[in-house]
Image: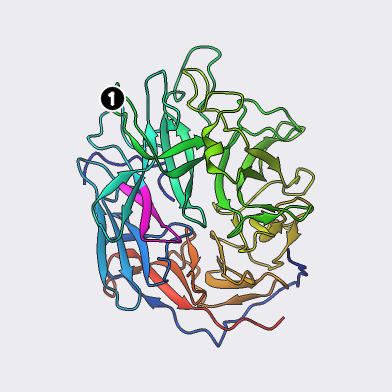
């Protein structure tokens, strides 16, 4: 989301067949895209969960750069798509920056990244030095920290020691997932200390954590937070061990059906980095099954939940991690394409991801959460170039391809172009292509001038979804 590489300044179940597609025309039934923001600054959507539950509002952050690439925003806003009316939900203070905002699917909470207030030379914005913050749209400006931070041992269970990023509520709004990096383990350290590795974490909402004020950067949290993925400093080649977990997504509105017909009610799919038998690092699809009772997430397994000065936080009891794809023998092994987050269809039977076909073209694939061979959905002569989201009925996926916002029919792979192709820097951007909860509209971002010939800024657009082709 443009926030990992650039420091913040100190100021301001489907039976699926596939169909080879060699050409694609504009869908005549689609209505033209409509621009919904106009301000002279960059607007950026997160890759999912940017619509209010009633599909009335879009939430976004602001950036100074025309393409939104620099994480330097100081406001979280929302726009009413029917009227263009803008409301400021949060404005950061004391040199902090904020961004990458998502909404709760059940109420008016929003969650986003907040960088350090009063940044210093040794504590500027970065992957291990950021936090999640929750604001209600009904209480703009009233921010509550999500994940607690404790940087001094003995560390506090339920608090973490670093930074969280891209926060997404679970379908029931009770948990929040995020990626995490550890400030205690970042940088050089004594021999034998574990490395700071990116992992996937969870916050259990409304389980407050109080942290001793032994460090200036310690803070309390409104949620009990844990690391949910097991990581290894040096994965054994050919094994299922991983050294990185990221780009996660909740599986199903109510989990998924296991092979025995019982229901796994909470699970997260994510990209896990393994080592092939030759030692090459590739990303594969993994899943973590979570316990039904969220209180189990507060119980440690083999290692302390809070970690130690030389070890990462431990994974809770009742969390099971599995590998779903095995692609090392492919011509182009591993997950490939633009940065994207794994996304499940609503019933949880398929997990979508991107991978190159034998010709090197980025195509859409899915895999079952119980395992099995991946299924190739698209067979286009052009690649998918964006993150993607499913429609609420689970029949289509919205994405950007060949300079257009497109809809992919997941049953036959047919790709329909919804917008005229624009293949230069003013075309639909890769960060987001997000279907509304009511399934009627898609939100995306383009870089356009405020006035003809003037400076370009990233603006939010929406387009109506056309009728679904009959099966």
Vertical arrangement, residue 135 with respect to residue 454, above or below: above
Residue 334 appearing in the image: yes
Vertical arrangement, residue 429 with respect to residue 409, above or below: above
Residue 68 appearing in the image: no
Q: Which residue sits at x=21%, y=42%?
A: 11
Does residue 315 appear left or right of residue 256 in this picture? left
Determine the secondary structure under disc 1: loop
Does residue 117 appear left or right of residue 238 in this picture? left
Using the image as rendered, state which of residue 452 and residue 184 is in the foreground.
184
Vertical arrangement, residue 307 with respect to residue 101, above or below: above
Tell me which segment is drawn in magenta: 98-112
Does residue 296 appear left or right of residue 286 in this picture? left
User: Residue 393, position in %: x, y?
Assistant: 60, 72
Q: Which residue sits at x=56%, y=14%?
A: 192
The chief SS type of the magenta part is: strand
Using the image as rendered, state which of residue 257 and residue 444 is in the foreground.
257
Using the image as rendered, state which of residue 441 and residue 111 is in the foreground.
111
Vertical arrangement, residue 345 with respect to residue 265, above or below: below
Answer whether residue 453 is magenta in the image. no
Name which quarter of the figure residue 274 lies in: top right
Answer whether residue 109 is magenta in the image. yes
Q: Where the C terminus falls, by quadrant?
A: bottom right
User: Residue 173, position in %: x, y?
Assistant: 46, 54
User: Residue 154, position in %: x, y?
Assistant: 41, 18
Coloration of the structure image: rainbow
User: Residue 325, position in %: x, y?
Assistant: 73, 47
Mark 1 — residue?
Answer: 213
Residue found at the very far top of the displayed protein: 191
Mark 1: few, some, or many residues within 10 Å (few <14, many ≥20)? few
**How many marks can you see?**
1
């Amino acid at each position: 989301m443009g926030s990992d590489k650039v420091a913040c300044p100190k100021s301001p179940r489907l039976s699926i067949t596939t169909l080879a597609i060699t050409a694609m025309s504009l869908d005549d039934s689609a209505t033209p895209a409509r621009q919904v923001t106009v301000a002279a600054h960059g607007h950026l959507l997160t890759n999912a969960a940017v619509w209010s539950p009633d599909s009335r509002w879009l939430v976004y952050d602001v950036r100074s750069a025309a393409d939104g690439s620099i994480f330097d925003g100081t406001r979280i806003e929302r726009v009413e798509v029917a009227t263009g009316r803008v409301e400021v939900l949060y404005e950061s203070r004391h040199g902090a920056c904020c961004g990458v905002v998502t909404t709760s699917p059940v109420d008016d909470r929003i969650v986003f990244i907040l960088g350090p207030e009063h940044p210093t030379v040794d504590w500027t914005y970065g992957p291990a030095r950021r936090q999640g913050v929750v604001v209600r749209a009904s209480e703009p400006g009233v921010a509550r920290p999500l994940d607690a931070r404790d940087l001094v041992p003995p560390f506090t269970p339920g608090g973490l020691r670093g930074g969280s990023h891209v926060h997404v509520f679970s379908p029931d709004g009770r948990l929040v997932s995020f990626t995490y990096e550890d400030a205690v383990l970042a940088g050089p350290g004594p021999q034998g200390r574990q490395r700071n590795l990116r992992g996937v974490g969870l916050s259990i909402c409304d389980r407050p954590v109080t942290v001793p004020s032994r460090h200036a950067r310690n803070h309390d949290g409104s949620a009990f937070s844990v690391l949910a993925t097991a990581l290894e400093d040096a994965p054994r080649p050919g094994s299922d061990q991983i050294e990185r977990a990221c780009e996660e997504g909740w599986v199903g509105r109510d989990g998924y059906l296991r092979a025995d017909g019982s229901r796994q009610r909470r699970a997260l799919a994510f990209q896990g980095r393994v080592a092939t038998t030759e030692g090459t690092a590739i990303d594969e699809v993994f899943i973590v099954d979570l316990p039904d009772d969220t209180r189990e997430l507060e119980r440690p397994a083999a290692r302390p939940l809070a970690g130690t000065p030389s070890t990462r936080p431990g994974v809770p009891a009742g969390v099971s991690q599995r590998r779903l794809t095995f692609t090392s023998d492919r011509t182009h092994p591993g997950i490939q394409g633009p940065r994207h987050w794994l996304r499940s269809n609503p019933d949880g039977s398929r997990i979508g991801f991107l991978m190159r076909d034998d010709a090197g073209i980025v195509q859409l694939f899915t895999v079952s959460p119980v395992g099995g061979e991946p299924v190739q959905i698209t067979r286009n002569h052009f690649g998918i170039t964006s993150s993607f989201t499913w429609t609420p009925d689970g029949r289509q996926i919205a994405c950007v391809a060949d300079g257009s916002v497109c809809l992919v029919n997941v049953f036959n792979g047919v790709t329909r172009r919804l917008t005229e192709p624009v293949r230069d820097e003013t075309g639909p951007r890769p960060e987001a292509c997000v279907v509304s909860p009511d399934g009627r509209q898609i939100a995306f971002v383009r870089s356009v001038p405020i006035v003809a010939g003037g400076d370009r800024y990233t603006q939010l657009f929406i387009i109506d979804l056309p009728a679904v082709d009959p099966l």
